[in-house]
Amino acid sequence: MRLKDLAEHLGLSQTTVSRALNGYPEVNEATRLRVAETAARLGYRPNASALRLATGRSGAVGLVLRGAEELGPHMSEFLAGMGGRMATEEIDILVTTVDSYADELAAYRRIAASQKVDAIVLHSPKLVDERVKLLKDLDIPFVLHGRTNIGETVAWLDIDNTGAIERATTHLLDLGHRRIALLNGLKGRTFAEHREIGYLAALSARGVAFDPALMGNSNFTDEVAFRYAQSMLELRPRPTAFIAGSMMTALGVFRAIRQAGLVLGKDVSMIAHDDVFPYLNADNMYPTMSTTRSSIRQAGTRVAELILQILGGKKIEEVHELWPVELVLRESTGPAPAS
Amino acid sequence: MRLKDLAEHLGLSQTTVSRALNGYPEVNEATRLRVAETAARLGYRPNASALRLATGRSGAVGLVLRGAEELGPHMSEFLAGMGGRMATEEIDILVTTVDSYADELAAYRRIAASQKVDAIVLHSPKLVDERVKLLKDLDIPFVLHGRTNIGETVAWLDIDNTGAIERATTHLLDLGHRRIALLNGLKGRTFAEHREIGYLAALSARGVAFDPALMGNSNFTDEVAFRYAQSMLELRPRPTAFIAGSMMTALGVFRAIRQAGLVLGKDVSMIAHDDVFPYLNADNMYPTMSTTRSSIRQAGTRVAELILQILGGKKIEEVHELWPVELVLRESTGPAPAS
DNA sequence: TCAAAATTTGAAATCGCTTTGAATGATCCA
DNA sequence: TGGATCATTCAAAGCGATTTCAAATTTTGA
């Protein structure tokens, strides 16, 4: 069913039908009603490609993922959040997976040149990230989830990683812990660097020396976390507290603690960063897990909203949001054991 | 940069340039080279919308997700698998999220009517699933991940859930277990029903009575699994073995076992179904986890391949794949404790 | 050597929509 | 009553590619 067919069916011109459906003012109200009713009855929908060609808008936003690493639980939550918001505007999300960083850059070039999307969501930035420059050169609107390239004008939404980890660390220090391990994200990623800054700031504020052996940088998988925690627990004196970068990490640390014959919340404390996965709940762990909490799904929803605003004409220098992170204390944190 | 610009730049007609780029035979080899070189140098890419309109192919496949529940770790792995394969063909994945089942049906209608995708991946089928009929009516090619509507001609790829759980159950019976709990997926979902069939078959083959109190149907979250396992472990006689529907479920069961002061692999055995998440490894658990294993990411890759075959003209009645599932025994399974 | 065949190129139609600019008829007011 | 204004409608021109059909040029073969 094309517009032409519908128009013939109605005995009207394509022009009028198109206008009627798109809410232009210069069409008789009775006609509009008749058109709307018939279109609905016949299940007419404009052909997406034609519509895009005519309007120059693709009705989609792009998301490029390095498949293996990035399409994990964090991303799927974020995606769910974005999807919810975009769905209400009937905007699609175009997911492109690539294998390498070079491929990622090429993917942006391709997407931009072929005009497949109206905007892009950029994510997992490094402190200095050339993707920003590329997207600017390509002149395609984008919102960054995270922060990068201090000083450069970019639309972004980020959580206060520094503040979160600083508070968590300080809290552990308050409880008497002095050997506090940090299982952080990959070196170079902005969020990981920010967390490190918060961690170091808290330590130095109390005059506690930083021990590089107590910091790990890796992906957030329970496996790597297990290994890290295991070897850290063999140190003497061993750490009495862990700050885990994600709930997945927390699971690994958890196992290592138990395997070492220690009790979480008593011998060893832990605070994990909780991105709020619906299937992995800090409140339902045993013992319940103290966390720094920020819903990554909500962030996805909001990023979608920001994209819509930018497409609506809002200036990117006005689009910045730094979300506070709450510290929720539960059973996994306790006073440092007497040494 | 439009085709027209490129053509002018080259002093050729759009026709010739288009042909040269698309590998038509009737163009001089020297010309073709010149065109290809210039196009590459200038970064020309055909406008996706125009190309789609002209060819009638959208170059995308659709995936409709009920956001909240479905965009979890399983789906993101599957998506990563699909994405990898589709990327090599420069086919996009269009992710649409919806809130309800009714919305899902409406989404398919919309997608089909607006011709946004060339094919659809249908997933998470129920034993009887009206979405199949809808997609057939809409006359849009699709591949089903899973199975449904026995007897109906559909292209599908599924794993042998029945066989997997039957073997797992049988193995536990062999170890002397008689009270075996099954934490299954949602009632009505094909895979869950298939697993139940395998479970019941194994029990009845050994003359072990089925106890409804030992079966749970729910989503695969560690939280629900924890609750189920917790209450099952309060039964007397209590279950001595668990079959967990996923690795997330296993984590919950794990915690419940430990909370009850029991030891996994000794007091209680467990076999979990492992979809092979890169961030949650059965080999690295403590104790290591016995599993029925089948990579959902590989399934995604293969489903993408099947879609390409169908788009290439392969008949859907020739597209069926039933994948065997391996049983990998590790430390979480042991002989039933003397009662 | 010259008509026929093969090679190479291009003009214009097409895909299905939006939107510009013009036309039609109805309404208004002096 | 008649010119100006308003409200509706439509024909046709894009949007940027592919593809049909025709034309120009070269090559072939008797």
Image (spheres, coloured by chain):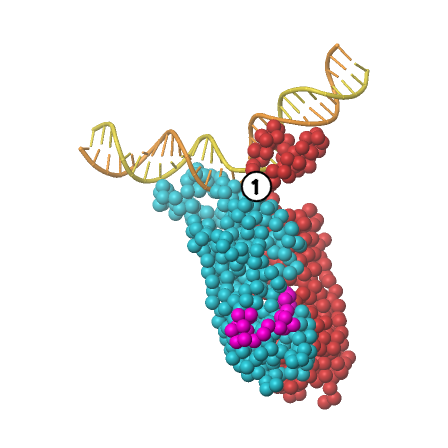
Chain colours: A red, B cyan, C yellow, D orange
The answer to whether residue B67 is left or right of residue D14 is right
What quarter of the picture does the C terminus of chain A occupy? bottom right
In this view, the residue in front, B15 or B97, is B97
Identify the residue at horizontal 65%, vertical 34% (top origin): A35
Instruction: Find residue A47 and report its horizontal and vertical position in percent.
Output: 57, 41
Residue B118 in magenta stretch: no
Instruction: Find residue A264 and report its horizontal and vertical position in percent.
Output: 69, 81
The answer to whether any part of residue B26 appears in the image is: yes
What quarter of the picture does the N terminus of chain A occupy? top right
Find disc 1 in the rendering and name its residue: A47
The answer to whether any part of residue A248 appears in the image is: no
- Is residue A214 depicted above or below B121 in this figure? below
Give amino acid for label 1: Asn
Chain of residue at mark 1: A
In this view, the residue in front, B227 or A163, is B227
Query: Dot 1 surroundings within 10 Å: few (below 14), some, or many (20 or more)?
Result: some
Instruction: Find residue A334 and report its horizontal and vertical position in percent.
Output: 75, 81
Identify the residue at horizontal 41%, vertical 42% (top origin): B19
The single residue placed furthest to the bottom in the displayed view is A339
- Is residue A328 depicted above or below A304 in this figure? below
Residue B214 in magenta stretch: yes
Q: Which residues are magenta?
A: B199-222
Identify the residue at horizontal 57%, vertical 33% (top origin): A4
- Is residue B155 depicted above or below A199 in this figure? above
Q: Quadrant of residue A16?
A: top right
Q: How many marks?
A: 1
- Is residue B11 depicted above or below B247 in this figure? above
Disc 1 is placed on an element classified as: loop
Instruction: Find residue A37 and report its horizontal and vertical position in percent.
Output: 66, 36
In this view, the residue in front, B230 or A218, is B230
